[in-house]
Amino acid sequence: MTTDKIVDFKNRKNCSGQYRKWEELISGTAVKPTPPGGFKPLIALVVPPSPFTVPRGWGYYLARPFEGISYIATVLSNAGYRVKIVDARYKPAPLEYALSEIAGADVVGIATYEDGFPFIEKLAALAKKKFPARPVILGGSLVTSIPELMMRHVKADVAVIGEGELTILELMEAYCGGTLAGQIDSIPGLCYRGPHGKPLLTAPRKQLSNLDILPVPDFTLWKEAGGGLLRQNIVSGSRGCHKNCSFCYRTTPKLGLKSPEKLRRELELLKKKHKTEFFQFTDLTFTFSKKRTLALCEVLKGLRVKWWCMTRVEDVDAEVLGVMADAGCEQILYGVESLSQAALDEARKGFSEDETVRAMKLTRDAGITVGAAYVIGLPGESPETLERAAAFAAGLGTPCRVKYLSAIPGTGVYADAVKSGAIKSELSHLCGLLAKERGLADDDFLNLTGLPEPLYREVYRKIEARYVPGPYGTAELVKAKHFYTYPDTPLGEKEIRSVLEEDARLVSGSLLE
């Protein structure tokens, strides 16, 4: 068993950095971008492939741009850097594709996600072998959660820890000015190689609390995000979460907010630029504040758009749901997780089964489609509570998503599994279970409860059977040829693929008609 531990930022010396300088650069160039300069490097940002699948009719979730890397690309582009997003998803040979696409870049950035370690490790090694003088930078949730382990096993030069917008600008300025070697230890939010290659952490970067300084993401930097894909689009009004569930990792632990006015301007621009009619909010808890939710709904109602969000069952009431429905909310996805109070308490969910039932009823009464997400394998489950969850899902008659419990680095579940020996090697875990999770009933999973594996699979399939193909707001609007894997076909050497148009419920005309 390895001895790596989750980084405790609280116990490390804080460092303010030149926050105001970089915040002013971001907000200033959001209004008036700096034209690309010939002397500034070309930065390639690589998006790794994922084994994860979705049911037919939900392919948009696999093909859509990612918000985090869109923000990084946009702030760099606005600051005058040339930026290229290399989307390796759905490519028949993603490693070869990414390697060829970064050939002309001066700097390579690789996004790190929990299921992408094997690809990240191989791409970084090949990039340093083929282009040894070019910096390789890691960023994203995985390297933020276990930076030292990642830097020991991935041939990268430096990693951006936490939110990346301010850090990447400071890092790139030092690199372009030739001063990076001398000042890297004073740039907050980095993990870099010290003497003898040992990973060293700089002071943590203070999280952004005012997200109004951020630009509207430039989704045109995704070269395949055309053909109608952006007629439904992602947007966020906040970052972070006010809760701390045991199985959920947050790169931004505190809540950062956009004002309703900032959100209005952003939605107006996206609507005008991309003809977007349906927005999917990525906020983890859209309704955490009743006052704020009502203010956001006033904005959304005025824009005449349809939208979808995620939230918690205890953060809604009849008044809020009625206003949300009137403002165009089509569906709410709740993290139901379990019908076992013991499991909910163990997971630090902070709500009861009664609150789940109440939220479902109120949402349906408001005319909003209920979506429910379940986690199979939480400590505290019993055969009886698992069967109750399956029966509850069947009774809803609405879209249900289900997955096995994953021990994601940075979470309480992961720390406990490492401590108990359930995860014997963190590296093997990254290369094994996490890298092979497809979101299917026959996936391998880490059984932390001792209940029979066949029981878990049976309940998984029962909940999965409640799948509803492509609800109204998530109907496919894809004109280009994006590929996805059939989730109900076992993956193997002869992976079966289909064009989205063949199965998806296509929509012509306006969603508002």
Image: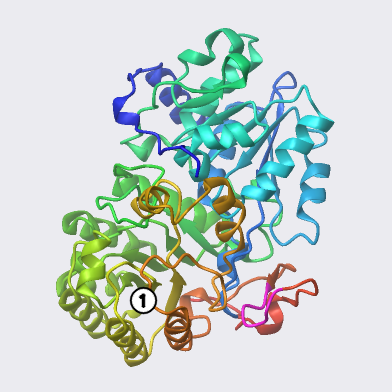
Residue 451 relative to residue 498: left or right: left
Q: Residues within 10 Å of mark 1 (few under 14, many from 20)?
A: many
Left/right placement of residue 198 relative to residue 379 reads right
Residue 489 falls inside the magenta stretch: yes
Residue 512 is at least partly visible in this image: no
Q: Which one is nearer the viewer's eye here, 147 or 240?
A: 147
The part of the image, by quadrant, that contains residue 355 is bottom left
Magenta stretch secondary structure, dominant? loop
Residue 285 seen from this side: yes
- Decide: is 255 above or below 229: above
Read off the magenta span: 485-491
Relative to 445, 62 lies left or right = right
In this view of the protein, which residue sits in the foreground, 228 or 505? Answer: 505
Q: Which of the 4 image quadrants contains residue 438?
A: bottom right
**Picture residue at 73% right of the left edge, 18% below the top:** 39
Residue 99: % across, % down: 80, 43
Location of mark 1 (residue): 372
- Residue type, label 1: Ala
Element at label 1: strand
